[in-house]
């Protein structure tokens, strides 16, 4: 880990030593990710079960061959509202997403991006693996000028930060990208089986094995399984096919 941090600091200088940075990252690698990842930690995923920086480019409403459909962010929000149910943190998000000025934005052209990591969560009983979208966040959720504590990353505060920055929108777009990627790469792909949800990791709040939890979800971790129906509906809508 120290050699990797040293290499990164050589490319992007920052006023910290490789040793200090590596030591600060260790707790994040040691924190169980909760039920969404079957209780595994980042360090439990070897190279064979981890795909880093998955780049994607998605045509929107046909890309350079427009379908004629006008797809707005508000249309995505309407579909989300049909599927989000009584999620304790996201039930109000569709209305937030549909509100001005975000909701009236038209989606067209191409959407490019990169998923920080896709983790393959294997089934201990030998069943098919699930694929988890993972994004790393370094957001400071405490008060500036006050020493940061794990308490600042209580799941409620993490959820507020997610919605404030529209990370659920990002997470679903990443899920669509993964859905299409797996459909192209896996001959037996089944969204209901192989899609595993999302985990947004606020690494400043991940304190290792003793990280507090709420309903088994650790502080610093936002996890959500949107379900295959929502991901497929968004994929169709983004393609200009309707939901």
Image (spheres, rainbow, N blue to C red):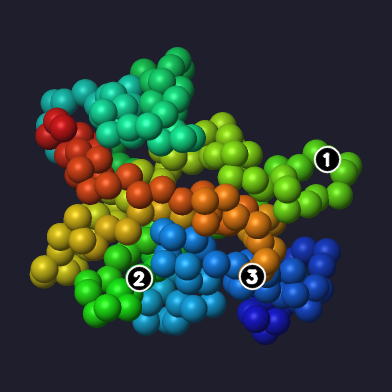
Q: Residue at x 26, y 28 (%)?
A: 82
From the image, tell me which residue sits under label 2.
120
- Separation of marks 3 and 1 at Cα, in angstroms: 26 Å
* Foreground of the two, 41 or 204: 41
Q: Give the image location of residue 84, x and y in percent.
A: 33, 34
Q: Is residue 113 visible?
A: no
For disc 3, the neighbor class at 10 Å (few under 14, some 14 to 19, many from 20) is some
For residue 123, what is the image quadrant?
bottom left
For disc 1, the neighbor class at 10 Å (few under 14, some 14 to 19, many from 20) is few
* Foreground of the two, 36 or 166: 36
Q: Residue at x 65, y 46 (%)?
A: 154
Give the farthest residue toward the right.
145
Q: What element does badge 1 sit on?
A: loop
Q: What element does badge 3 sit on?
A: loop
Vertical placement of 163 versus 194: above or below?
A: above
- Separation of marks 1 and 2 at Cα, in angstroms: 37 Å
Q: Which mark is residue 144?
A: 1
Q: Is residue 120 visible?
A: yes
From the image, tell me which residue sits under label 3.
209
């Amino acid at each position: 880990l120290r050699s990797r941090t040293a290499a990164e600091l050589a490319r992007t200088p920052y006023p910290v030593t490789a040793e200090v940075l590596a030591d600060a990252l260790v707790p994040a690698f040691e924190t169980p990710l909760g039920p969404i990842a079957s209780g595994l930690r980042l360090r439990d995923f070897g190279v064979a079960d981890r795909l880093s920086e998955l780049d994607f480019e998605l045509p929107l409403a046909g890309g350079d061959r427009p379908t004629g459909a006008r797809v707005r962010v508000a249309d995505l929000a309407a579909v989300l509202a049909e599927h989000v149910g009584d999620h304790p943190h996201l039930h109000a998000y569709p209305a937030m997403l549909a509100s001005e000025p975000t909701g009236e934005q038209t989606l067209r052209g191409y959407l490019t991006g990169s998923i920080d990591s896709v983790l393959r969560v294997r089934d201990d009983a030998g069943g098919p693996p699930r694929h988890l979208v993972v994004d790393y966040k370094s957001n400071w959720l405490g008060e500036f000028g006050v020493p940061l504590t794990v308490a600042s990353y209580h799941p409620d505060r993490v959820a507020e930060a997610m919605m404030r920055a529209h990370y659920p929108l990002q997470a679903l777009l990443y899920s669509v990208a993964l859905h299409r990627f797996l459909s192209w790469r896996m001959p037996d792909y089944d969204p209901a089986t192989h899609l595993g949800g999302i985990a947004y990791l606020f690494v400043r709040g991940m304190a290792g094995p003793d990280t507090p939890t709420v309903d088994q979800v650790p502080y610093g971790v936002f996890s959500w399984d949107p379900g295959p129906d929502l991901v497929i509906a968004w994929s169709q809508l983004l393609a200009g096919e309707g939901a």
